[in-house]
Image (tube, coloured by chain):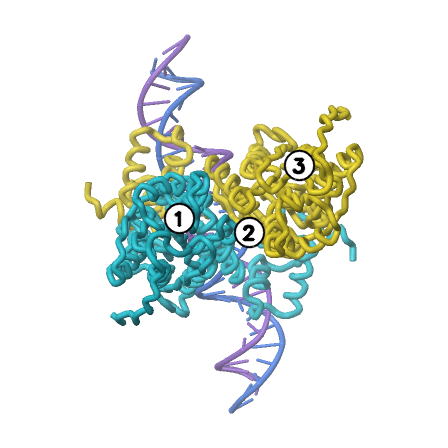
Chain colours: A yellow, B cyan, C purple, D blue
DNA sequence: GCAACTATGGCAACCGGTTGCCAAAGGTTG
DNA sequence: CAACCTTTGGCAACCGGTTGCCATAGTTGC
């Protein structure tokens, strides 16, 4: 009714009202007020309503810090990414934030700056401040990760480390599809622009590419390791040209976009002279020029899955509800790939893969 | 020396060691251990070193929650954005995260989903969990914002609300430059794709555009309000065509990219038939097709400035160290603007602006 | 040689909630 | 009507630190 009442916090001291202020005003004990909020069935309905009304009137809000102290649970999750600059992580953050919000959790975000030092420091600093961690593309060693896992619940993304639950975007299948796509377009020599040395997905991708290359009699050349950035792609484009390939598959879209940019600046036509395949399908991949053929990765889903996995770990009821989550990629063909300028279009039918 | 020692936490109970465990092991009181960390000069050097060594050996880490309770300071800042999906906020988050990290603060991120309800809930939920807020493009009413400001330190971005410190990216000057640029290319009828109704910058931009239009004798048409998304841009492109303009200025780059995409799909040449000017220069604006002429906004700087302003608010020593921060935009000319297909190229010299 | 001062460490209250345990009140059953 | 059960609320300890105040011991000054 009185608008001033529910907007301005009423407290004796002028500071935010506490459970004790409410209790005093209601003539009950603080514990009863506490229970009125967190354990309604332990309090008489009438008493409870009186307490809630008074609390509302006084503008009382439970202090999350005080609440977290006895329980040790903050309803907060830590998300650590190596580089916020990378739009890949934008999608991941988005998915994680949504899943966290849906479960009533808050997300704490930290950029580890591609440094395992910084990452470790961040984990230590946050350790009792959050209920668990999602480490995306962690730069920590396997040993360090296991160690951290002993201390707090933790899920890794894009890593496979023995006992830790992880979310993996497996581009092996997608990479094979991309390689077959290139082979069918007559490409015979393909460059692979490799990502960071420690990357699990980089290894998967390179192996998948090679397996198709062997079967199809293509030759491959690996360029890298490269930082997963546009600038590195710009620089690597020249290396591609020197290698005299007709197609390039890149570790991620940022590299591919860099390559596109540089080739364009040099007047080298894409896909007329060189075909380019990216990976991830980040924001921008569909409207760059030419629109990028890429492996579409369910990044947002991965962020969501990581948080769900972590929440499962926290929930003592359904312990170990699931270990790893493996998400597939699929090939999205746009305009950056075309028939090879040298080879003739191969119309070899795709052979069924051995199911090993 | 013994590697197991500094990695495995040693505690009597099996839980993480506390200040009391360290104190017991050292034969001192808990308060002394506390002081050894937070008030070194109050403890004898020898005692202190003994305590630190023992703490290290036991793998003791201060509990940030327990630390925050008496002081009320969590060394954590809340950053609320209406839509993480928007790359504009990616840059803002990046800047904010960096500034926070540099000051030893942690960032809590929340997406308010373009809803003032959600935003208010998030503020309330986080209120005692963070030391202050950065509200980016807040959807809250002025009254609510002032109310929140009474409760906790708070900085707004892209809003101007009487007593609250804010960071503003003022595109008025940039918009005038863009309008002059279009005028000099012979455009006489310009569409403006408006952003959300409540947007402060949207109003600034529209007014700046109109002021140049009046001076230059151009006609303008306002389309919107529009959601600041690619999809809205796609839809708005058709409206632009119907309006029979030769140039369009958009509220942000997402809209511009949507417009570009749709015009391309319809076979309408940019800039041959229609020129497009975006705003913000987000990731992707330079490699879309054609590369977008846009107002480059120092978004990351804005994020950084917002956090710095907030930290200044928290720091009782240098209270009110600065109120608003206004950051300018500048016109970045790329390939989405060109001479008007109808008008002849105007070579009217730019008149000096009245300095009012 | 004694008063005054300083350096150092301990005690205990406190931050704002949560929760185990107990007591009082009221209701039920035989 | 007594024995017992259930409901409800209070007391007090606790979560893990921080900090004001005090006690002790050692140092300095006169």
Q: Is A136 or B229 nearer to us in this picture?
A: B229
| Percent coordinates x, y for residue A322 in the rendering | 63, 29
Q: Quadrant of residue B355?
A: bottom left
User: In the rendered structure, the residue with mark 3 lies on which chain?
Assistant: A
Q: Residues within 10 Å of mark 3 (few under 14, many from 20)?
A: many
Whether residue B126 is visible to the viewer of this picture, yes or no, is no
Asked if marks 1 and 3 fall on the same chain, the answer is no
Residue A101 lies, with reference to residue B356, above or below; the image says: above
Dot 1 crowding, Cα within 10 Å, few <14, some 14–19, many 20+: some
Residue at 26% in and 51% down? B143
Is D1 rendered above or below residue B24?
A: above
Q: Can you say which quadrant of the picture contains the C terminus of chain B? A: bottom left
Of A199 and B217, nearer the camera is B217
Q: At numbered mark 1, what does the secondary structure look like: helix, strand or loop?
A: loop
- For the image, the number of numbered tags is 3
- Residue that badge 2 annotates: A84
Q: Residues within 10 Å of mark 2 (few under 14, many from 20)?
A: many
Q: What is the x, y in percent for residue A124?
A: 61, 52
Residue B72 is situated, as x and y percent measured from the top left of the image, at 44, 55
Co-location on one chain, circles 3 and 2: yes
**Image point (50%, 60%), residue name:** B99
Give the secondary structure at mark 2.
loop
In the image, taking residue B94 as reference, residue A141 lies left or right, namely: right
Residue that mark 1 sits on: B273
The residue that mark 3 highlights is A171
The vertical placement of C22 against B315, above or below, is above
The answer to whether mark 3 and mark 2 are in CB contact below 8 A is no
Work out whether residue B58 or residue A95 is closer to the camera in this orientation and state it: A95
Between the residue at mark 2 and the residue at mark 1, the CA separation in whole angstroms equals 38 Å
């Amino acid at each position: 009714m009185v608008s001033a009442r529910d907007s301005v916090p009423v407290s004796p001291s002028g500071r935010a009202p506490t459970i004790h202020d409410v209790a005093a005003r209601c003539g009950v004990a603080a514990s009863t007020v506490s229970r009125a909020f967190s354990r309604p069935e332990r309090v008489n309905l009438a008493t409870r309503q009186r307490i809630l009304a008074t609390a509302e009137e006084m503008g009382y809000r439970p202090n999350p810090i005080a609440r977290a102290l006895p329980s040790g649970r903050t309803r907060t999750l830590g998300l650590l990414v190596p580089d916020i600059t990378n739009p890949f992580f934008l999608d991941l953050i988005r998915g994680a934030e949504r899943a966290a919000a849906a479960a009533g959790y808050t997300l704490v975000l930290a950029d580890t700056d591609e440094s395992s030092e910084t990452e470790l420091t961040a984990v230590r600093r946050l350790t009792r401040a959050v209920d668990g961690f999602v480490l995306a593309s962690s730069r920590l060693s396997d040993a360090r990760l296991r160690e951290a896992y002993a201390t707090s619940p933790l899920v890794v993304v894009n890593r496979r480390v023995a006992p830790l639950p992880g979310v993996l975007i497996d581009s092996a299948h997608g990479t094979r599809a991309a390689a077959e796509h290139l082979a069918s377009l007559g490409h015979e020599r393909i460059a692979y622009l490799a990502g960071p040395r420690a990357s699990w997905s980089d290894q998967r991708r390179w192996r998948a590419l090679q397996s198709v290359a062997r079967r199809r009699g293509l030759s491959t050349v690996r360029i890298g390791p490269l930082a997963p950035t546009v600038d590195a792609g710009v620089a690597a484009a020249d290396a591609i040209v020197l290698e005299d390939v007709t197609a390039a598959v890149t570790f991620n879209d940022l590299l591919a976009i860099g390559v596109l940019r540089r080739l364009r600046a040099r007047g080298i036509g894409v896909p007329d002279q060189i075909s380019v395949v990216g990976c991830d399908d980040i924001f921008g991949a569909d409207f760059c020029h030419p629109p990028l053929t890429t492996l579409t990765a369910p990044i947002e889903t991965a962020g969501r899955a990581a948080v769900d996995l972590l929440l499962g770990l926290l929930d003592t009821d359904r312990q170990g509800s699931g270990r790893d989550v493996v998400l597939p990629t699929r090939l999205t063909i746009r305009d950056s790939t075309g028939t090879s300028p040298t080879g003739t279009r191969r119309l070899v039918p795709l052979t069924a893969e051995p199911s090993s």
